[in-house]
Amino acid sequence: MPSLPSHATGHAAGRLALALAALLSAPAAFAADWRDLPTSFTAGGTEYGAKGTFQYDSNRFSDDERADGSAVFEDDDAWRRQEFYLFARRKGVFEATAGYDFTARSWGDAFVKLTSKVAGDVRLGHQKTLVGWEDYGYGTSSTIFLERSAAENAFYAGRRTGVEWTWTGLPGWRFALAGYDGEDLNGDNAGTTFAGRLVNTPVSGERRVVHLGASASRERRDDGIARFRARPNAALTDVRLVDSGRLASDHIDRVGLEAAWREGPLLLQAEWLKGSNEAPDGGHFDGRGWYAFASWSLTGEVRPYANAAFGNLKPKHAAGAVDVQLRYADLDLDDGSVQGGRQRDWTLGANWYWGRHLKLQANYVWLRSERAGVTLEPEILEARVQLAF
């Protein structure tokens, strides 16, 4: 496990403070206008509305020189997401939603969900796959760090078109089964996938929550290609320091294990993920990764827990809510003849929540990658302004 660089630890707090100070220059009047913005209305017992998540990011890289002195990454400021959704729902009966990300130029969730107290929920359409808690459970507006872990980035399958059944008929338990077929709504990922997910919450109170989960899936892609790779905890670059390359594939298996403990303002969370590929000729590849983090609300708020995931802090004070967090993550894509590399990183973060809609984030990342005898140890300063409703 890599240690935090001594020169970096001395300046990290100052760099995070400067990043947050820059973000806080957003006019207070603008934030106040969004504080109680109505985003839905109810007619005939059905709620109609709109949801949106707009994130503008800044990425700054250092210590990323190649042997010839050139930089691996380019600093950038750009939109991370511009998501807009329309929905209609009647509590306990149905929900219909459809959304598009204008930055990625791709469809998000687009499904109809039917609800039964006895039989559970059935969701048909374009939706998230089950393996990968950070993606499946957390909405894009409620991520605790700017970017999800490297293991999640490498192994999460994204969205597929199909049907998902979820049942919560036993107290403290949540079961889900899903099947997907054909292309997604963006015309990609043709094939079939079957997946399952199980979550147990043995403790669930106002201040204390214990979450345990497991998930698995099998995918057969029509193109017969598998690939596992991850960005360096920064989404504004297309550079990947670890990459298995294209692998001939008969099927892809994914497995995830997850756990979390919330005690008042403290949240501890960890997840282990594995992605495996079986080639038509019998060749086998295993990639593995995991992360663990601690998050602490400095202003005393308790992070809400619903639908087997944690949400954004809800400020108790007029000045908003502030939390800090530290994560360690490890991704290994070396296995036999496939030398995809290994990436390990520490991420120190701080978030400031102003009302329900404005969220400011800053992360500092210390990263080490090793691939094919080449080692890089870049540092990344990231900041985000998020407006969500």
Image (cartoon, rainbow, N blue to C red):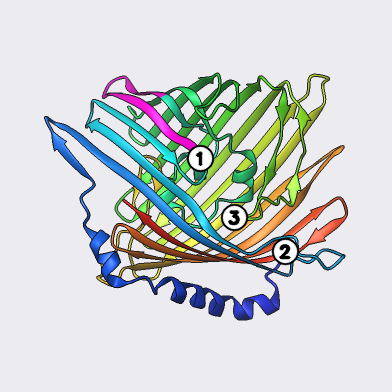
Kindly identify the amino acid type of the residue bearing the numbered disc 3.
Leu
Q: Earlier in the sequence, mark 3 or mark 2?
A: 2
Residue 380 in the image, given as x and y percentages of width and height: 63, 65
Q: Which residue is mark 2?
A: 2
Tell me the tag on residue 105: 1
Magenta residues (range): 105-124
Q: Which residue is mark 3?
A: 236
Q: Front-most of 174 and 287?
A: 287
- Residue 5 location, x and y as percent? 70, 73
Q: Residue at x 49, y 55 (%)?
A: 79
Single out the mark in the foreground, 3 or 2: 3
The structure residue drawn at horizontal position 45% and vertical position 55%, both measured from the top left corner, is: 55
The label nearer to you, 3 versus 1, is 1
Q: Which residue is located at x 29 percent, y 63 percent?
A: 315
- Residue type, numbered disc 1: Arg
Look at the numbered disc 3 and give the secondary structure of its residue. loop
In the image, residue 262 sits, relative to residue 156, either above or below, namely below
Mark 2 / mark 1, whichever is N-terminal: 2
Q: Is residue 382 left or right of residue 320?
A: right
The residue drawn where x is 29% and y is 66% is 30
Task: For mark 1, give the secondary structure.
Answer: loop
Tell me if 336 is positioned left or right of 61 in this view: right
Task: State yes or no: discs 3 and 2 in contact (Cβ < 8 Å).
Answer: no
Outermost residue to the left: 44
